[in-house]
Image (spheres, rainbow, N blue to C red):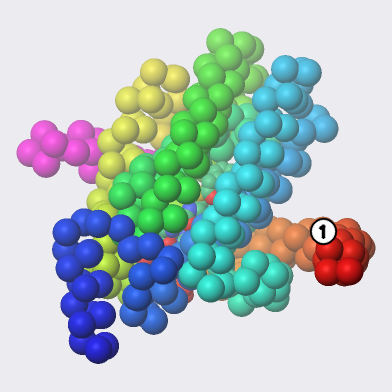
Amino acid sequence: ALAALEQRFARTIAADHRIEPRDWMPDAYRRTLIRQIAQHAHSEIIGMQPEGNWISRAPSLRRKAILLAKVQDEAGHGLYLYAATETLGADRADLTRKLIEGRQRYSSIFNYPTLTFADVGVIGWLVDGAAICNQVPLCRTSYGPYARAMIRICKEESFHQRQGYELLLTMMSGTEQQRRMVQEATDRWWWPALMMFGPPDADSPNTAQSMAWRIKRDTNDELRQKFVDMTVPQAEKLGVTLPDPELRWNPERGHYDFGTPDWAEFKQVLAGNGPCNAQRLAHRRRAHEDGAWVREAASAYAAKQAARAAA
Ligand code: FAQ
């Protein structure tokens, strides 16, 4: 019986059809999805902090309204993704516990500080740009609920990317000091943005199996290259320099060559030693503790309603 189930799963994947929650799936496939989707959800929630830092200091009412909406969208993405993990049998409260106990990951990128308002623009341009590059192929991932969640999330991420680029275009047509702020923020975010795609393929333990299961549709290095190729012309149009002396067009490959990210730094950030890891987790933990009374009240209310319905 197990062999028949395994065969049907393999046929569904080979035909490029979707696996749905009610379908049989290998335990390791389920575990990999829960790991990746939970990490993605945690990233959206922790990712609210660096930009949230600027909501109260946005330079105009218009910029404040835009930033509030963007950070709210990220909360929505997080909840949407937690709901996708629940279709796999995970429990959101349990995932949150694992996050605040440091037992599950979130993206390395959110462990860097936002020092000036230009960072808000650069996060939209580079961080959301990298997120889109990684997530558009995930609209075709083999697990149905994750693929469908990605369609909506990508639409909102494109909007985020454009607001960041528009903010930077505005700053670049401003004063010399504003142009310097944009360049300085680009210098700080460029390499961490390249690290968002994960370790090089040769050091990526999960890629081969995830590609075979069609959870991932491209490797880490393929997506990193795609991101560099699409971003270089945007940097030129903006008038900023990307901080990589090795960056140049390679006509034979038809791609840009680029330098090597500092993978030792990446490992340090993953080990919890990035500039803001402790601060991000402490903030998330505090928010969770401060919200305990809301969860208690909601549970008490739900129990009361259920008792009333039963009476
Ligand atoms: N940071 O074998 P691989 C956003 C871990 S966008 C931290 O290559 P995999 C939007 C990896 O988990 C950001 N950890 O792993 C936004 C694994 O750990 P484990 C979120 C990383 O899974 C914008 C180990 O290293 N997007 O939030 C990172 O096949 C602006 C070995 O790596 C997603 O999560 C990293 N950068 O490939 C929000 C996209 N890279 O558990 C607010 C979905 C790797 O084995 C503001 N995820 N690791 O110990 C993916 O596509 C994949 O999970 C990868 C990693 C590509 C990230």
Q: Residue furthest front?
A: 311
Give the main secondary structure, helix, strand or loop, of the magenta stretch: loop
Q: Name the quadrant of the C terminus.
A: bottom right
| Picture residue at 21% right of the left edge, 73% below the top | 8
On the rendered structure, is 2 left or right of 82?
A: left
* Residue 28 seen in the figure: yes
On the rendered structure, is 68 left or right of 241?
A: right
Is the residue indicated by label 1 positioned so its CB lies within 8 Å of ligand 1? no
Percent coordinates x, y for residue 287 in the rendering: 82, 58
On the rendered structure, is 24 left or right of 161?
A: left
| Picture residue at 38% right of the left edge, 62% below the top | 20
| Picture residue at 38% right of the left edge, 25% below the top | 234
Residue corresponding to mark 1: 287
* Residue extent of the magenta highlight: 243-257
Percent coordinates x, y for residue 308 in the rendering: 89, 64
Percent coordinates x, y for residue 70 in the rendering: 64, 34
* Residue 295 seen in the figure: no
Percent coordinates x, y for residue 294 in the rendering: 88, 59
Q: Name the quadrant of the N terminus.
A: bottom left
| Kind of element beneath mark 1 | helix
Quadrant in the picture for residue 130: top left
Compared with 156, 22 (above or below) is: below
Is 274 magenta? The answer is no
| Picture residue at 60% right of the left edge, 17% below the top | 171
Nearer to us in this view, 106 or 210 = 210
Compared with 191, 71 (above or below) is: above
